[in-house]
Image: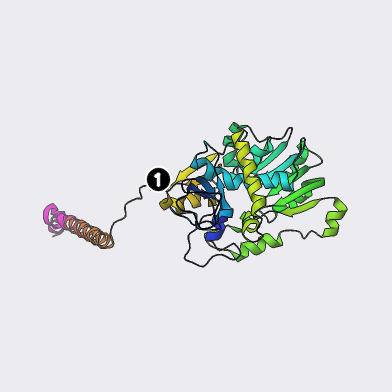
Amino acid sequence: SGLNFQDLMARQGAIDSPPKTPFIMGSECAGDIEQVGEGVENFKVGDRVVALPDHKAWAELVSVPATSVFALPAGMSYLDAAAITMNYTVAYILLFDLANLTPGKSLLLHSAGGGVGQAVVQLAKTVKDVTIFGVCSKSKHEALKAAGTIDHLLERGTDYSNEVRKISSEGVDIVLDCLCGEECNKGYALLKPMGKYILYGSSNVVTGETKSFFSAARSWWQVDKVSPIKLFDENKTLSGLNLRHLMYQHGSHAFVRRAVERVFALWNEGKIKPMVDSTWALEDVPEAMQKMHDRKNIGKIVLDPSLEPKPKPATPAKGKAKDKKAASQENQEKKASSVESEEGEKKKEPELTNGTSEDKSDSGK
């Protein structure tokens, strides 16, 4: 199963129409078909597939509508399937259906080190002479420089707009934004005439361990409201992509299937290869989600139900902990009593053995 940022948002209740709890999370999984429902013609038991369910992917057995199931190319591992399908499908639609990427164009990409970010970079490099400005945390720069696929790395939280202008005074042709908030204003200002600004996420809303209405409101109010007249006057395009809505609210399964098939074709041709950050057992999903929450992953995080969970640090039982605490307290009291006793004996010693005070009194007599 793949771990995606929308899973973090679902956990915090930051998505619209979240399922009623308790529910199984996850929106991407790969494996063998165990059973086929009535009327399903394109799949059979034993087929190797990947699926994009609305939820419930983080399990050993998943019931998925046939419209959300895709046959794997020969030779593609389940690990690659879980790492490639959602991220590269999103990236493909962003670049080729919405941005209309052509040779010689330039693009600014936020979260360049994440799973979708790396998918965008690889797919963009299948087009000649595309210049990529990648924004990400400073901690990821060394690894991304070693990969050598991003032309200009920019640090998140800095005035990267000026850095872009130094290299390309006119700005960029495409901005891909998964953050929302104040980044929208910076990105829109960097667009050239005929440029395209595409929003495909709002990860700035996820700032803590729980849903934050303040963060959501702040992200919304930090965005300048762009009127249609402004877009008309400046010859710019503003659009968005929500793959979950596209599939499960708008019913555009055929459109998504074409994108998935094109991504698999590029994988077959050796033009793209998913970057897997790490794999985790299902039992370790809290740690895996925390890594993504902290923006520490470079590439895709994958959950593998066949893996053994990492050993957890041993914690003493409540009764034993109390006994240990009581014993420790008793030892401290004994030690304190012993110290007090020794100090008392030391104070008495001069009177009993020294005799100086007695000598002085005798001499005084």
Magenta residues, dominant SS class: helix
Q: Is residue 159 visible?
A: no
- What are the residue bounds of the magenta stretch? 346-364
Residue 207: name its quadrant.
bottom right
Q: Amino acid at mark 1?
A: Leu
Callout 1 secondary element: loop
How packed mark 1 is, by other alpha carbons closer than 10 Å (few <14, some 14-19, many 20 or more), is few
- The number of numbered discs placed on residues in the rendered structure image is 1
| Nearer-the-camera pick, 13 or 70 | 70
Place of residue 252 in the rendered image (x, y in percent of width and height, measured from the top left): 66, 55
Give the image location of residue 65, x and y in percent.
Answer: 55, 57
User: On the rendered structure, is 346 left or right of 44?
Assistant: left
Is 2 placed above or below 167 here? below
Q: Is residue 161 visible?
A: yes
Q: Quadrant of the C terminus?
A: bottom left
Nearest to the observer: residue 35 or residue 342: 35
Q: Is residue 102 above or below residue 200?
A: above
Whether residue 298 is situated above or below residue 221 in the rendered picture: above
Apparent side of residue 156 relative to residue 304 in the rendered image (left or right): right
Quick check: is 306 in the magenta stretch?
no
* Residue underneath mark 1: 307
- Residue drawn at the location 15% of the way across and 55% of the way down: 349
- Give the x, y percent position of residue 191: 79, 46
Q: Nearer the viewer, residue 145 or 119?
A: 119
